[in-house]
Image (spheres, coloured by chain):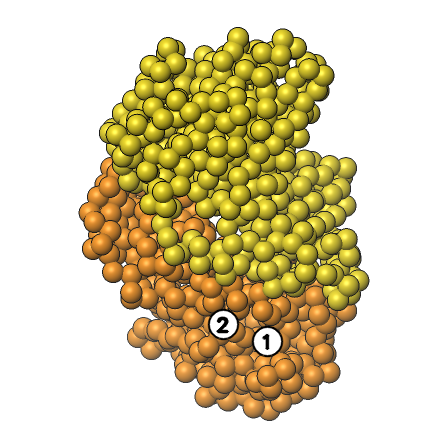
Chain colours: A orange, B yellow
């Protein structure tokens, strides 16, 4: 269902021949209205791909009628010709739909520094338009996959309205194993300013807290489009909650499908002096290769967790920290706690809890372990 | 030669039985004077091991007569008993030498969160004192090894004076694959304030620019002791230059012996608006797992280099960067440059040059690639 779960959207996924594998590589999602209110967030990387440069400008009016996405090429660092290719792709979609190019968002994912095969992309757009369907959600979610092993979709809703979303990649909005692209649709009738606030709130609590390998993509995009087709204007708090649910669902699907990972790790910092302190500590642990290798090796190595916490500016007493792995408090008061033999790291899902004893705030960062398979996947081919 | 290359020093390395392997594990270096001027720098990690907490206080008077180092246990997060063990180790050395414990520096390296076997350590100190010799440099350098495959020693000097040093571990002063311990001796006659300034200058340009895996150890220590036995007080600039040479030599030996690495990578950022900008860009690339995997895979993936640069606040135009790998300018003006096929990544030594076109400053950060062997070594056993 995903992006076609909400009323007023059609979608398609087709094969344009951009991928050597011959798998589907062009997705199109069209908002049939009546509303075209939209909001988006983009990578915070200063080195942005051409589709991001285009889409950031195009969304400024708070409106989007369609989004076209290609896998099989990031169109990043491809010079003026690359930007022109993005622009002509938007124009081709606009022509078919009888709208302005400014109402077309564009996303790309794949290898950096290689020009897209523009004739193939444009022919792909033609096929995608012809294939548009109110049941096209799964096809669209499939055609944006790169190293993803499964497509990612999620839905949520309220009384008379729906939200649907699709995603590809793994990593956090910004950091990413591969580029993260997310398209979310809703038939709730909300203006673009409300959508923008809701989207920023939802992504801050979900995609922003996903830090698979600390690497930040040039192409990350999350777009939210409203058709208003339900005629329902839900309570904003209720809408934001449902949107956050969809984002969290997609984020955890990305985490579970991260390249080469053996474990999904939720690092929760509790009793922090501020939410920022909790996030800083969680991120520092999530970015420790030594910690991530230890989890791969099924070793609840709390020394590496303390060593990471020690690199932050968060408020805490370095000699009075508690750490639990899978709820076993292996470190108490910065010393040996319960036996590490009580910790079972066979299951994929791992929790780490760090008690800073400095306040009342808490936050969770999600990451993966660092495995030989990750190194293999990211050394054996270019992205 | 190393730490006994300079006049006025004796050293020893003995086996106390702290390591399961039965290899040497206690090193002792004694400064016989006439001077006892000394300076040290320590890990910037807030979670410090007990020997670091002790040594930081003990060096405050600018004097050190001896340093005792053990491998086979980090004595970190071992509670009040751990600090007492460090203190009693210093006292035992002091007793033998007829000096105050405050003049004894202590270093430990090994597993965090496990108490040292103190009787073994103290018996090891007794044996080390008995084994002290003006030819003991190599033994001392050997007994501090953990996952090191070779001992690391270096010397330099001027007219009538010498500097010698030994090191173990890999990583940067702070970040570390394993803990980095460095002991440097000199018979030059300089006071502790001068030694401190020279040491901070030398480490800032060498160990501080080594970033093997971005992880920061709890035990890192660099100690510089002067015996003054040469009777020569060299020009401070000349001394600092020689000291920097010794530090660079040791740093590159650490890099070359980093756990599981296949490549040594020198990342030089040129034409930066400031030295800090150059360092920030270099560090961001050095910490990109995707970049490090690419080098392991012999892929001159400049897209991953730009994507890392894009996460920094350094002054540059994201659309006007040049990047060379092994002096082949594979990226020009943030677009495709010379063919990547011209880049030979078979040799261990790799250079990356990033031209920011924003000023006149430059700086080099050294790192390693990320390999399956690194993941194996750091998942298969605790550190």
Q: Residue at x 39, y 69 (%)?
A: A256
Look at mark 1 in the image and give the residue it sits on: A71
Of all chains, the one bearing label 2 is A
Mark 1 in CB contact with mark 2 (< 8 angstroms): yes
Q: Quadrant of residue A78?
A: bottom right
Above or below — where is B223 with respect to B283? above
Could you say which is closer to the camera, residue A124 or residue B6? Answer: B6
Residue B170 percent location from the top left of the image? 52, 42
Q: Residue at x 27, y 25 (%)?
A: B84
How many numbered marks does the figure carry? 2
Above or below — where is B158 with respect to B381? above
Residue B213 percent location from the top left of the image? 51, 48
Could you say which is closer to the camera, residue B145 or residue A130? Answer: B145
Bin the neighbour count of mark 2 within 10 Å (Cα to Cα): few under 14, some 14-19, many 20 and up.
Answer: many
- Asked whether residue A98 is in view, the answer is no
Q: Quadrant of the C terminus of chain A?
A: bottom right
Residue B291 percent location from the top left of the image? 60, 57
**Is residue B295 found left or right of A350 in the rendered image?**
right
Q: Quadrant of the N terminus of chain A?
A: bottom left
Residue A150 percent location from the top left of the image? 44, 78
Give the label on residue A322, or none: none
């Amino acid at each position: 269902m995903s992006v076609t779960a909400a009323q007023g959207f059609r979608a398609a996924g087709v094969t344009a021949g951009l991928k050597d594998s011959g798998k589907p590589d062009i997705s199109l999602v069209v908002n049939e209205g009546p509303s075209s209110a939209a909001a988006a967030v983009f990578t915070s990387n200063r080195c942005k791909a051409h589709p991001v440069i285009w889409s950031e400008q195009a969304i400024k009016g708070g409106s989007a009628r369609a989004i076209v996405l290609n896998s099989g090429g990031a169109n990043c660092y491809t010079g003026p010709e690359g930007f022109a290719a993005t622009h002509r792709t938007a124009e081709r979609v606009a022509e078919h739909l009888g709208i302005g190019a400014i109402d077309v968002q564009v996303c790309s994912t794949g290898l950096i520094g290689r020009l897209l095969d523009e004739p193939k992309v444009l022919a792909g757009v033609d096929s995608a338009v012809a294939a548009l369907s109110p049941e096209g959600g799964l096809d669209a979610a499939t055609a944006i996959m790169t190293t993803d092993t499964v497509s990612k979709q999620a839905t949520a809703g309220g009384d008379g309205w729906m939200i649907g979303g699709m995603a590809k990649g793994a990593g956090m909005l910004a950091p990413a194993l591969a580029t993260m692209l997310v398209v979310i649709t809703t038939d709730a009738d909300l203006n673009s300013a409300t959508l923008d606030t809701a989207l920023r709130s939802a992504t801050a609590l979900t995609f922003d807290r996903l830090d698979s390998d600390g690497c930040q993509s040039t192409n990350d995009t999350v777009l939210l489009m409203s058709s208003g087709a339900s005629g329902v204007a839900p309570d904003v708090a209720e809408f934001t909650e449902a949107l956050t649910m969809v984002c969290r669902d997609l984020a955890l699907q990305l985490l579970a499908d991260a390249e080469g990972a053996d474990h999904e790790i939720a690092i929760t910092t509790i009793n922090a002096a501020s939410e920022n302190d909790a996030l800083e500590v969680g991120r520092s642990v999530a970015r420790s290769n030594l910690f991530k290798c230890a989890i791969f090796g099924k070793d609840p190595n709390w020394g590496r967790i303390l060593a990471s916490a020690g690199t932050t500016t968060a408020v805490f007493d370095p000699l009075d920290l508690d750490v639990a792995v899978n709820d076993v408090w292996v470190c108490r008061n910065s010393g040996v706690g319960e036996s590490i033999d009580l910790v079972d790291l066979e299951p994929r899902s791992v929790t780490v809890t760090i008690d800073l004893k400095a306040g009342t705030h808490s936050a969770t960062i999600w990451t993966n372990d660092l495995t030989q398979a990750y190194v293999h996947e990211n050394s054996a081919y270019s992205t």
